[in-house]
Image (tube, rainbow, N blue to C red):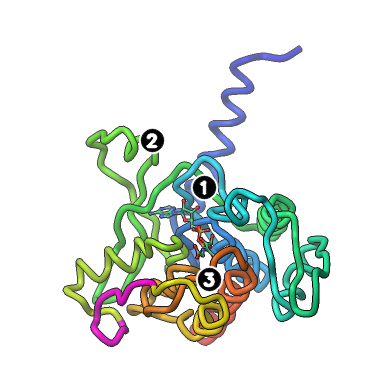
């Protein structure tokens, strides 16, 4: 026998148990693209409490689109160990070029991070940040549906020791902080420098240099890092996104461990 109301209760109670327990965490990651998910997985593996807020119904950012909707992604040799660990099949195309099925990579990132304890909340947008004593202390969240409908709905908040902007090209969180802090980002101008035109070789290299703290307790990774610090875009090569997620996880692991 199946009772309709028990089904509704089960969903609501379990969702809100998890939601309430996620209002305070070690790290909030904004954006469930490849960089954000890889960061989340690696931080959760270190035992930290990680919450991811994702605007869309379907997590994954640019992954399912591959290149021009051809749903394959290319990764290079140095990011291969990350995908091997996640259990993703890679086909060697030629020296230093591997091809993965975009959906398999996304499935693995989601499955493995959730298994490690990451809480991923899709359909929730981060619309602002908490700033306490000149440091980012959390995020301001709202239903994406309310945002999309233009409804005047006041948001809620989620506090975290660190916030990661993994929002891709738009670098939305760094943009908000730049605007609200009067241009006090750790960039040469204090503001967002802006993404440069496509150049895969350089884009991938500088991405790791650009993956860092951009305002006290706010880090950037993935495409957002190159947007903030003025690196080139790199098209559908995804190794750098994974390595950038891994790097931000390493940086935060040492910050969080030092705290104890
Ligand atoms: C909640 C939000 C908000 C918000 C955005 O775009 P992504 O895939 O980002 P990365 O950096 O992990 O990967 C970039 C890659 O996909 C890409 O675009 C590349 C390599 N481009 C190169 C090129 O030359 O074009 O994912 C970001 C995610 C998305 O799912 C957004 O929906 C989400 O962040 N998001 N979620 N609150 N305010 N803003």
Q: Which label's residue is closer to the chain start, 1 or 2? A: 1
Which badge, 3 or 2, comes first in the chain's sequence? 2
1 or 3: tag closer to the N-terminus: 1
Quarter of the image where one finds residue 257: bottom right
The verdict on label 3 being within 8 Å of ligand 1 is yes
Residue drawn at 43 percent across, 66 percent down? 165
Residue pictured at 44% horizontal, 74% vertical? 225
Q: Which residue is mark 2?
A: 145
- In the rendered view, does 229 fall on the left or right side of 184? right
On the image, the x and y values in percent for residue 71 come to: 67, 51
Q: Nearer the viewer, residue 176 or 140?
A: 176
For residue 121, which numbered disc appears in the image? 1
Q: Which residue is mark 3?
A: 234
* Region in magenta: 186-195
Q: Nearer the viewer, mark 3 or mark 2?
A: 3
Q: How far is the residue under mark 1 from the one under mark 3?
A: 28 Å
**Residue at 64 percent of width and 65 percent of height:** 41
SS class, disc 1: strand
Distance of label 1 from label 2 (alpha carbons): 13 Å
Query: In the drawing, what numbered circle is on residue 215?
Result: none
In the image, residue 254 sits, relative to residue 55, either above or below, namely: below
Q: Is residue 2 or residue 28 the one in the foreground?
A: 28
State the SS at label 2: helix
Q: Residues within 10 Å of mark 3 (few under 14, many from 20)?
A: many
Residue 164: percent from the left, percent from the top? Answer: 45, 68
Q: Principal SS element in the magenta part?
A: loop
- Mark 2 Cα shell of 10 Å, populated few (<14), some (14-19), many (≥20): some
């Amino acid at each position: 026998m199946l009772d309709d109301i028990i089904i509704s209760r089960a969903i609501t109670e379990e969702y809100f148990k998890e939601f309430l327990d996620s209002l305070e965490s070690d790290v909030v990651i904004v954006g469930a693209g490849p960089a954000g998910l890889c960061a989340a997985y690696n931080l959760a593996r270190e035992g930290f409490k990680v919450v991811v807020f994702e605007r869309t119904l379907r997590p994954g950012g640019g992954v399912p689109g591959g290149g021009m909707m051809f749903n394959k992604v290319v990764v290079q040799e140095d990011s291969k160990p990350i995908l091997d660990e996640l259990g993703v099949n890679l086909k060697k195309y030629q020296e230093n070029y591997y091809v993965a099925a975009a959906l398999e990579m996304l499935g693995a990132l989601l499955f493995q991070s959730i298994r490690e304890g990451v809480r991923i909340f899709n359909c929730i947008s981060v619309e602002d940040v908490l700033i306490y004593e000149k440091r980012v202390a959390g995020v301001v969240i709202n239903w994406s549906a309310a945002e999309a409908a233009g409804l005047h709905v006041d948001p809620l908040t989620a506090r975290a020791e660190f916030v990661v902007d993994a929002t891709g090209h738009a670098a939305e969180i760094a943009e908000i902080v730049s605007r609200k802090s009067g241009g006090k980002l750790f960039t040469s101008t204090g503001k967002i420098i802006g993404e440069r035109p496509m150049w895969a070789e350089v884009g991938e290299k500088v991405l790791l240099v650009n993956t860092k703290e951009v305002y006290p307790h706010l880090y950037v990774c993935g495409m957002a890092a190159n947007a903030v610090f003025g690196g080139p875009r790199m098209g559908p090569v995804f190794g750098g996104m994974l390595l950038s997620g891994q790097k931000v996880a390493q940086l935060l692991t040492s910050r969080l461990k030092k705290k104890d």
